[in-house]
Image (cartoon, coloured by chain):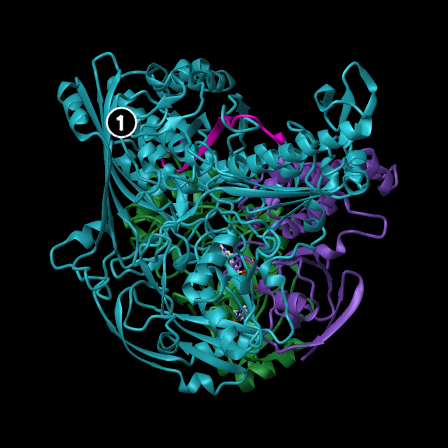
Chain colours: A cyan, B purple, C green
Amino acid sequence: MATEVHMHGRIGEPIKRKEDARFIRGKGNYLDDIELPGMLHMAILRSPHAHARIKSVDTAEASKMPGVIAVVTGELMAQHKLAWMPTLSYDTQAVLATDKVRFQGQEVAAVIAETLYQAEDARDAVVVDYDVLPAVIDPEGAKAAGAPVIRDDKEDQKDNHIYHWESGDQATTQAAFAKADKVIRLHTFYPRCHPAPMETCGIVADVNGATGRATIYMTSQAPHLHRTVFALVAGLPEENIRIVSPDIGGGFGNKVPVYPGYVVATAASLLIGRPVKWVEDRTENLISTGFARDFHMTGDLAVDKDGKMLALRVHLDSDNGAFFSDAQPTKVKAGLFHIVTGSYDIPTAHVTADGYYTNKAPGGVAYRCSFRVTEASYMIERLVTNAAIELGMDQAEFRKKNFIRKDQFPYESPTGWVYDSGDYHKAMDVALEQLGYNELRKDVEARRAKGEVTGIGIASFTEVVGAGHGKDFDLLGVRMFDSAELRVHPTGKALLRMGTKSQGQGHETTFAQIVTEELGIPAADVLVEEGDTDTAPYGLGTYASRSTPVAGAATAMVSRKLRDKARKIAGHLLEADEEDLVWDNGRFYVKGSPDKAKTIQEIAFAAYSNLPDGMEAGLEGVHYYDPPNMTYPFGTYAVVVDVDKGTGQVKVRRMVAVDDCGVRINPMIVEGQIHGGLAEGFGIAFMQLITFDSEGNCIGSNFLDYLLPTAVETPSFELGETVTPSPHHPLGAKGVGESPTVGSPAAYVNAVIDALSPYGVTNIDMPVTSDKVWAALRAAGVNE
Amino acid sequence: MKVSMTVNGSERSGDVEPRVLLVDFLRTNLRLTGTHIGCDTSSCGACTVLIDGEPVKSCTQLAVQADGRAITTVEGLATAAGLSPMQIGFHEEHGLQCGFCTPGMMLVGTALLEHNPNPTEEEIRWAISGNICRCTGYMNIVKAIKHAAALRESSEVVPRETAAAATGGE
Amino acid sequence: MYPTAFDYRAPASLDETLSVLKERGDEAKVMAGGQSLIPLLKLRFARPELVVDIGRLPHLNAIGRDDGHLVIGALARHVDIENSPEVAASALMLAEAAHWIADPLVRNRGTLVGSVCHADPAGDWGSVILAMHADLVARSASGERVIHAADFFKGPFETALKPDEVVTGVRIPVGKGRGGGAYLKLERKVGDFATVAVAVHLHLDGNKVEAAGIGLTAVGPNNIKATEAEHFLRGKEPTDEVIAEAARIASDAAEPKDDIRGSAAYKKDVVRVFVQRGLKAAVARAKEGRS
Ligand SMILES: Cc1cc2nc3c(=O)[nH]c(=O)nc-3n(C[C@H](O)[C@H](O)[C@H](O)COP(=O)(O)OP(=O)(O)OC[C@H]3O[C@@H](n4cnc5c(N)ncnc54)[C@H](O)[C@@H]3O)c2cc1C
Ligand code: FES
Ligand code: FES
């Protein structure tokens, strides 16, 4: 395969990905591929109980087993003040349990041995004596009188309530409800699910006993943030920590938090003086790390008799598990959930939220989601479809009647968000056109007349991504800016480093294209590096669709800085006034004489060889970009389903997705992101469920129970687009990785509800499984 | 126990406990890390290799079972002549994102085209149904395998390198 | 997750296998394709001292016809059955069932006989051999015996086999009269075990059902033979009403439990729906001579 790039790689060109070369040869370097001399392996012993007091941990037998170097217990960690660690939500989390276990799968002890087979053998020999306590498995149980107090380790914690939080205006909302002609209520549960990237989480900790230098390879979506957390948790001097995030096999939010296993492996490496590897197995991944959602929501929508929305009221109970470790900005408690008015011009709204401890794994990660916007979007889009059905209005018409209009942007929402730009009517129209909505509606009626169960669902989501303006958004106090450092070498090739970390999103290509656009260096000549905190500039990482909005902007800005310098050098070389130079992607020429020109490559060489007097050498720079606002991607998704009356099985016949993510840098990559998100949205809507029995046993602890869609179930997607640039992003881009998981679940479920609406069915909670649909059909007297 | 097998065309052997899984033998003993592990329940296909040309989950095979067999891993797909049509197809059609499922997907695709040179979308979807991808939504994987099928077809007339160049593959 | 340590033998002949089992059968596990056994070893649910790999035994992978029977050797894999012209011609239901089992990668290794010996109540082949009135041929150092499918399953993961026995193959009566069958499975995704599945097979004599077989998957402690429904059908013309009644009777034979896949009532009803659909398909196939 030739290495030249045929297309230049400017913005809008679907050039092939640079990173593919190593992956298609099996030469990626993922965490588990790392092998260091003398490396040991760690296996973690986990609690079989959801809630139990630990009476004793006996490691005597295990310590004597072949190959075993150490058995680490909570007691040992406590001696080093490492039995507990802080979370991203200002709570504490047990590293290895000392007093109680608080969820099934909690870390109790760790065995470090020469091989993983030996470590697992010895893990079997660790004996733990438990006193089993009653388990709390949902907010209802957490609130119940006499519920066991899960966090009795915290002095001031007398019950299981974590936080209360509000947004919007209660008084005006109440007043609007009082005047409403109709109020539509939806109580819905967005169940717990898990991002489950194909690669699980892991670490290789290599602490040099002599220098104290810790080199930590880890599956991290946010290496710099993790370095800072490590410094805070372990008390290590930050300059002595180097985090390297190698190739990552998918993240989707799972690889944002710091997990106890990381801390234990690092401590073990420090104590033993050899590198220690720990890679979760799939069960550990599903039962202990990074769950998402688990929101119990009640929404009321007030409308007048013409179908105009008047007010929205939402309450949610959040199930946060045993430790409040949501990965979210400091100043919010239920993430960005208060964007719940979505795409609609609702004059007033009031949102309340309460968080609860339960005997379930902690996490609350933004699974392909910008901090709980997924739950918000689901709530409003489900509620709006229900309202349309109840009002006897067409779902699309009802939406269009209430959309924020194009001329209202920038639009300030009743909960304080300032939407940057949008054209919701247009996205809807494109989607309806692509679907052939009017024809399909008639077809649905005809099929129903024949006794078929079929329906169409729509969702018109508004996303909020690109956290964020640093004055409002920070993690542990660190403002959520991001960074790019660009070095143009004398030969005109470039090295770009960022504080983000790709997990498959194609940063090595997309960000190179931004340099191409801004500086005229072909994408093929720009090497993009991320993930090594020793070399990359400080940044907050990749999640919440923030890379393009923030680091992408930083890349554009640093490129422009260098272009400004290049202009000065070009003026010097061309003996022309700077003002008289015209930039023409990749070269400056003198106004009026296009032949008098210097290419960026020539200028780059001059930056190291022939500079104007007094100018510093080099063509390098760095930019830290703190965005003025979030960006607000949006779109309309439409789904057609057929339901089998005999079994309740749902088949997605069509799925049309119109996305507006502003300017698309690499349309091929953007579409790939959308495909992936739509498939995950499909999984969440129909199959992916982490649930618990009454004793707190996790059901969904492996891929036999936690169901991920295969190519056979996954629908074929029909994509469409509109482009409404972000007015404040230097490139007009908005970010897209999460729109499809945010927007699609409601579209899928709305289609099922539409299909069942002739039978009076108004809700089925996700996952919409065939048994639930069957029960709804039979309850309505529909049979085969 | 001593095991020997042909891996990507060369004789490889090692000394392993009977309980050692084939995937560990490949990854740890032979350092062929392109074969991945994605689950513990034989559910994901990240560990797919070809045994005597057939795709199999190497996490659900003992290394000793593979004694005397011919194994192909992702590292064996490219030849001296260049990338295989399947690899080119995945690159051209954006059939991969994080790349973790990709070796398994490409091996399954390769085996499929051996006995069904021109599969339909439906046939491809069923053929890769033992392999989970979390990134791509499968759309472009299907296209990639079709692309490879078309390349193979044309390469029956044109030598492989020329075919690759003709498609503008980078 | 990794297996505990074990000894490993891969005998070159059936006789050698039988003598190893005679000696160490109690502490040994036979392994065919390993697609059930290896996952169990990895989870450490099974901790045998010895694994006897029969995967290298000669001749056991054959699929052939013998005296009115379809004979499936112990090493014939799911994929072999799925693609066998012999199966397609004489017992289409087997090819249909094979397609629903696990995923294509597992089907490249797992065997019908291994699946039957594993006796997972959610296993698909058990219902097939019950509906087809098949026999299993078991060998030990002391000889050979034939076990009727109906006598083989003793409970979840329990069979009539003795620790020193190996099943060498399954014999399925085919070819007399106009037969037709179908396998219907409700699974949540490819690779999932059945929520409910049913195997139905019948022979027509003129317009009447001469013999019927119905096997139910995942709705009891083992694969269930819906004997009453089979009797009910015998001698009757398979009208819509008769089929609906047979389906109802078959669903009464199911003893499912509530679980994450659905309620007992749901599963019983799907049995009814599937037996009804399956019988209709089987009748149509029998009439068309499509087995
Ligand atoms: C991901 C996955 C999904 C699956 N999905 C399904 C499904 O949907 N439906 C389904 O039916 N099955 C399913 N299976 C199981 C699969 O069908 C297995 O292949 C089958 O159950 C076992 O066949 P095997 O040859 O691999 O047997 P092995 O795993 O080798 O053996 C299984 C058991 O049978 C015994 N045994 C094997 N052969 C003999 C013999 N000849 N004589 C005596 N004892 C013997 C062994 O000792 C062992 O106890 C699935 C498996 C996996 C891994
Ligand atoms: S690692 Fe998942 S199937 Fe092998
Ligand atoms: S490309 Fe990431 S899992 Fe398939």
Q: Is residue A407 above or below residue A616?
A: above
- What is the three-letter code of the residue carrying label 1? Tyr
Q: Residue furthest top?
A: A306
> Which residues fall within the magenta stretch?
A643-667
**Foreground of the two, A450 or B147:** B147
Badge 1 element: helix
**Foreground of the two, A559 or A618:** A618
C103 to the left or right of A262: right
C200 to the left or right of A92: right
User: Which residue lies at the image location 63% right of the left edge and 38% below the top edge?
Assistant: A511
Q: Quadrant of residue C127?
A: bottom left
Q: Is residue C110 above or below residue A372?
A: below
C260 to the left or right of A270: left
| Image spot of residue A597 (x, y percent) | 81, 24
Q: Is residue A20 above or below residue A522?
A: below
Q: Quarter holding the C terminus of chain B?
A: top right
Residue A352 makes an appearance in the image: yes
Tag 1 residue:
A759
**Foreground of the two, A630 or A302:** A630
| Image spot of residue A50 (x, y percent) | 29, 64
Magenta span has A664? yes
Magenta span has B75? no
**Foreground of the two, A171 or A670:** A171
Q: Quadrant of residue B52?
A: bottom right
| Image spot of residue C198 (x, y percent) | 42, 48
User: Which residue lies at the image location 52% right of the left edge and 54% below the top edge?
Assistant: A223
Residue C133 makes an appearance in the image: no
Q: Residue furthest left?
A: A145
Subunit that carries the residue with mark 1: A
Q: Quarter holding the N terminus of chain B?
A: bottom right
